[in-house]
Image (cartoon, rainbow, N blue to C red):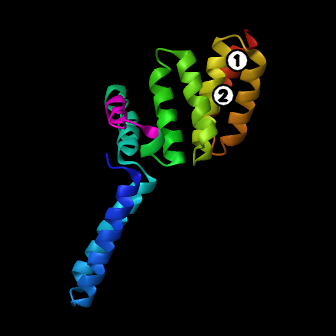
């Protein structure tokens, strides 16, 4: 909702206010205001609408996730680079239901901007492998599946990788 720099300005203002509270002897008010400033700093690094979209996806509510992502009007200026990567990742998941070509572009853009967690990168590569397989690009799909398998250190995507490898043998 707010520009990323406005969040930092608000956090700095609240921090100055908390210092004045400490000087006046209102220690609890100062501590509370520091925690409030911390929330704005958190939302600088983790966009609130992206967090809400992930929450909706966790509940399998694609319409709700799309609604929250729609609140981000200009992702390139409103978001930090990693947040923009996650924005494109989420948009790719939404669009992959209907338009594979557009979803492929979004997943590639998300990977180029960067995703923080290795399992998110693995998921994006797994999605790209599925798209490449549906477009009959066997070599690219195999390479992406192997990369996704290496990145999936916790074994969360093992079943999906096996399923795609079985389908890949049929091509």
Query: Tags 1 and 2 in contact by the CB under 8 Å rule?
Result: no
At which x and y percent is residue 116? 57, 48
Give the magenta part as a residue range: 65-75
**Which mark is first along the chain, 2 or 1?**
2
- Give the quarter of the image for residue 75: top left
The residue under the point 36% across, 29% down is 66
Could you tell me how many numbered marks the image carries? 2
Give yes or no for residue 93 being in the magenta stretch. Answer: no
Can see residue 31?
no
Q: Of helix, strand and loop, which mostly describes the magenta segment?
A: helix
User: In this picture, is 142 found above or below 167?
Assistant: below
- Residue in front for this viewpoint, 171 or 63: 63
At which x and y percent is residue 7? 35, 58
Q: Which residue is mark 1?
A: 166
- Residue in front for this viewpoint, 20 or 38: 20
The residue under the point 45% across, 46% down is 79
Q: Which mark is residue 52?
A: none
> Crowdedness of circle 2 by 10 Å Cα count: few (<14), some, many (20+)?
many
At which x and y percent is residue 168? 72, 15
Q: Which residue is mark 2?
A: 161
Asked whether, in this view, residue 85 is left or right of residue 140, the answer is left
Give yes or no for residue 66 being in the magenta stretch. Answer: yes
Name the image quarter holding the N terminus. top left
At which x and y percent is residue 68? 33, 36
- Give the quarter of the image for residue 25: bottom left
Name the secondary structure under disc 2: helix
Give the alpha-carbon distance from disc 1 to disc 2, as whole Å. 9 Å
> Crowdedness of circle 1 by 10 Å Cα count: few (<14), some, many (20+)?
few
Asked whether, in this view, residue 63 is left or right of residue 154, the answer is left
Name the image quarter holding the C terminus. top right
Name the secondary structure under disc 1: helix
- Give the quarter of the image for residue 144: top right
């Amino acid at each position: 909702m707010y520009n990323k720099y406005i969040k930092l300005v608000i956090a700095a203002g609240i921090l100055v206010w908390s210092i004045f509270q400490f000087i006046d002897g209102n220690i609890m008010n100062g501590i509370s205001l520091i925690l409030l400033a911390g929330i704005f700093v958190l939302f600088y690094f983790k966009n609130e609408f992206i967090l809400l979209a992930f929450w909706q996806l966790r509940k399998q509510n694609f319409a709700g996730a799309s609604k929250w992502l729609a609140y981000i009007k200009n992702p390139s200026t409103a978001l930090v680079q990693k947040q923009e990567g996650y924005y494109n990742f989420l948009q790719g998941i939404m669009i992959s239901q209907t338009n594979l070509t557009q979803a492929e572009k979004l997943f590639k853009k998300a990977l180029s901007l960067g995703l923080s967690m290795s399992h998110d990168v693995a998921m994006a590569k797994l999605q790209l492998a599925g798209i490449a397989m549906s477009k009959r690009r066997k070599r690219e799909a195999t390479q992406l599946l192997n990369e996704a398998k290496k990145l999936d250190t916790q074994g969360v995507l093992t079943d999906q990788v096996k399923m795609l490898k079985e389908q890949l043998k049929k091509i």
